[in-house]
Amino acid sequence: MQQRVWQRSASWRGWRKKVVAACALAFGAAPVVQAQAPAPVPVVASFSILGDLVQQVGGERVQVRTLVGPEADAHVFQPKPADARSVAAARLLVVNGLGYEGWLERLLRNANYRGELVRVADGIEPLPARDSHDHGAKAGHRHEHGHDHGEHDPHAWQDVRHVIHYTQRIAEALCRVDAPGCDHYRQRAQTYTQTLRALDAEIRAAWAPIPPQQRKVVTSHDAFRYYGHAYGVQFLPAQGVSTSSEPSAAGVARLIRQIRAEGVRAVFVERLTDPRLVQRVAQEAGVTPSPVPLYSDALSPPGGPAPDYVSLMRHNTRAMVEAIQGRP
Ligand code: ZN
């Protein structure tokens, strides 16, 4: 404040401009000098879906950088020195939590980060990680670059109600680092929450015509348990909860038997995963995988089918419902 006062009094030219502007205003002309907007708050989000949520809440008051961008896999991310520099320069770091960012602690140390950190999934009722028998000898083993198979499933954003919670957590965190913008953040969070409530209702309406026993979907990795829990869909993942784990032969054989026995028609490859496992499963079970991929852990680039969270949920829902109904 002191400095700003000094700058004003020292700048005679600026002062004169303001007088001119005031006169122009008095005579009904457009103001010549405009109030300068505050510099945007630098925020780092761990992955693309959170990056979108921070942008929705922050609007023009924030400058968001995403560590794991669109179509990139947060399970196997390896931070680079440039990522540590971005984190070091941030005033707020937004992560999912629940063990999703297994690389976070090391990155915080490397960046010597002392700023605000928010784990948006803190406070939700987490689902337990699926029992890890299918991971065979690797169960419980901490992957070098992925997340460990902790006790909770981290993919909570697949339930829109949890993202309403994420949105509130983001708004509160932004209020802590940028108090003058707090009303702005709360207002935007409220507006976005209304969008999310409408999205939640839209997803329920889309599934309503499908009888519960037909709501079965085969996917690549175990990323949709929250979606299944929220919207009454049973997911049969070919792979475990992290993309970095290997499925067992017995688990794959069991899945093929189940697809045949239960007449499962919706078989999907996810955007980030190696399609070969699901393709093999589908072929052996005698079903055709959907030509449309599902987006689980990352957005698509702009112009793709899932450039933001709301589009991602709409795209996945439509693709699954249409596959079950036998439409291409
Ligand atoms: Zn995942």
Image (cartoon, helix red, strand yellow):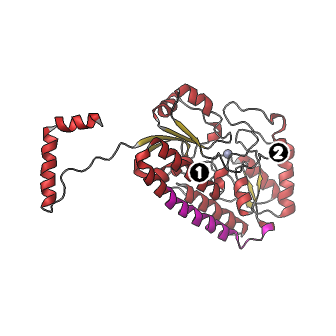
Residue 251 image point, x, y percent: 84, 46
Residue sitting at the far bottom: 209
Image depth: mark 1 or mark 2 in front: 1
Q: Residue at x 71, y 51 (%)?
A: 125
Q: Amino acid at mark 1?
A: Tyr
Residue 311 image point, x, y percent: 55, 59
Q: Amino acid at mark 2?
A: Asp
Q: Nearer the viewer, residue 271 or 158?
A: 158
> CA gap, disc 1 to disc 2?
26 Å
Ligand 1 falls in which quarter? top right
Q: Is residue 293 visible?
A: no
Quarter of the image that includes the N terminus: top left
Q: Residue at x 67, y 48 (%)?
A: 155
Secondary structure under tag 2 reads loop
Q: Which residues are magenta?
A: 189-212
Q: On the image, numbered disc 2 is attached to which residue?
A: 131
Q: Residue at x 14, y 46 (%)?
A: 17
How many neighbours does mark 2 have within 10 angstroms: few (below 14), some (14-19), or many (20 or more)?
few
Residue 7 image point, x, y percent: 22, 35
Q: On the image, numbered disc 1 is attached to which residue?
A: 166
Tell me where residue 148 sits by quadrant: top right
Q: Nearer the viewer, residue 26 or 271?
A: 26
Secondary structure under tag 1 reads helix
